[in-house]
Image (cartoon, rainbow, N blue to C red):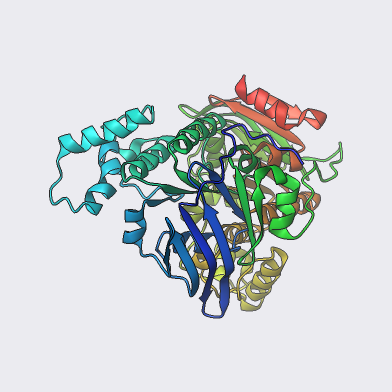
Amino acid sequence: MTTNVEFGASVDAAPPVLSVHGLAKRFGGVVALRDVSLELRPGEVHCLAGENGSGKSTLIKIISGAEFPDGGQIVVDGESRERMDTTSAIETGIQVIYQDFSLFPNLTVAENIVLTSAVAQRHKFHNARRARAQAKEIVEELQLDLDLDADVGNLSVANRQLTAICRAMISRARVIIMDEPTTALTHAEVTNLFVLVDKLRDRGVALLFVSHKLNEVLRISQRVTIMRSGAVVTAGPVEDFDIKSITKFMTGLDIDDVRTLPELSPEAEVRLEVVGLTLPGAFWDVNFQVRKGEILGITGLLGSGRTEIAESLFGIVPAERGTVRVDGESVAIGSIRDAVSAGIGYVPEDRLTQGLFLEKSIADNIVASSLSEHRTKWRVLDRRRIRATIDELFQKLHIQAPNAKAAVRTLSGGNAQRVVLAKWLATNPKILILNGPTVGVDVGSKAQILDLLREQARRGMAVIVISDDEPELVACCHRVLVVTKGRVSGELAGDDVSVETIQQSMAV
């Protein structure tokens, strides 16, 4: 097997700064970790891979002191500990950068950078001048372009992430755990992040890199540990792995990610037609068609207007001009209710805040958008039909939970995404728009979700997939539209749909 490791060479076998041995953890009757061991060495990027529910998050929480293990040991600089609390973890130099970065949006970059360190050092008063000087020192040391006086709430995702990294480094971090660090970054931002990661390696920092993007795993890591069902199934140098082998170890299955398209008849009727759709400041003169049974991809850099187009079609931010036709009839979409009435469903980019009622049950979420379809002729809810819909979609989408009464907040990312899909499939839409349908889900869940979209297309649904994941678009889309600065700048179809052509079109 060969891999293309672009950043940094393998480090010599230095003593680990942190290691765990035989960790075990149960939550009630559920085994979360079983005899898990891992070593993190200075100046090395160690990737932790595994499907949602494999035990990665529990392992991170134990290392960072947020959870206590039921068994096993944590060893820091050769000193064995049965468990670590959050304070001792930070004092030891262990920092976790979560997906939400845990920053204060109403504080400046400088204030966020120094806050954790100031609390740890028990400073009673805030000295703005001293704080800014300390923040400036670490920003310049890492050669970053950050406005120290900007409010974090106004920053891009990439700059919020850089702020979190600076905060970790000013606290003298020796171990940095990055949880899905590239989920919302553009290609250029990912490259910049990896350059920074290499600088951290040169400083002797040990990095634990958690990601579902296997190409990035191979690109940045020196060692890989793969978990499944709470246990480590394999570990070794990155050179011993490729995408196919990592996938096999993660899932126990051979998953084929080649281009697989539902058959599309040349005579298939146009299901959705968009003509001259315009929302000044977001997008202009957007034109396209989607036929029954077709999967259309829409891609572009963050800020290109791709999400705004989807939100306009769903009535979240209605367009000011243009025509939308469904099955040949013009429809006025001025609200979400208008879109749903026209047969349009939308799976949003941020499923946790926009797509789900986290405290409600899986069952309640599945039928939340389709209650009108589950009424009798007397307008009374048909409990039997509701139960049948919930049971059917719960099974069909392979939602992994004890039962449909479980709260959505207890689910992994992949299962939460399945619930959002189930909610809209329950409405039996003519057109389903999905914004980042597999962001943050594991490779097994991703394959199942794409298979589900193919199945819906075969049944005549028009599917629109908005994504910057080129392999995902190639795997399931008949055509791909490229959006640049609010306009459709290119269209790829047939054999022209490839990772290389999509990237080239986005770069033009």
Q: Is residue 431 left or right of residue 160?
A: right
149 or 392, nearer to the observer: 149
Q: Is residue 185 left or right of residue 133?
A: right
Residue drawn at (69%, 63%) of the image: 397
Residue 332 visible: no
- Is the residue 33 above or below the residue 156 in the image? below
The image position of residue 297, as x and y in percent, is 68, 37
- Is the residue 467 above or below the residue 65 in the image? above
The image position of residue 184, as x and y in percent, is 51, 41
Residue drawn at (81%, 44%) of the image: 260
Residue 337 visible: yes
The image position of residue 34, as x and y in percent, is 59, 71
- Is the residue 494 above or below the residue 120 in the image? above
What is the quadrant of residue 111 in the picture? Answer: top left
The image position of residue 508, as x and y in percent, is 62, 19
Residue drawn at (53%, 34%) of the image: 190
Q: Is residue 219 left or right of residue 262?
A: left
> Which residue reaches farthest top?
508
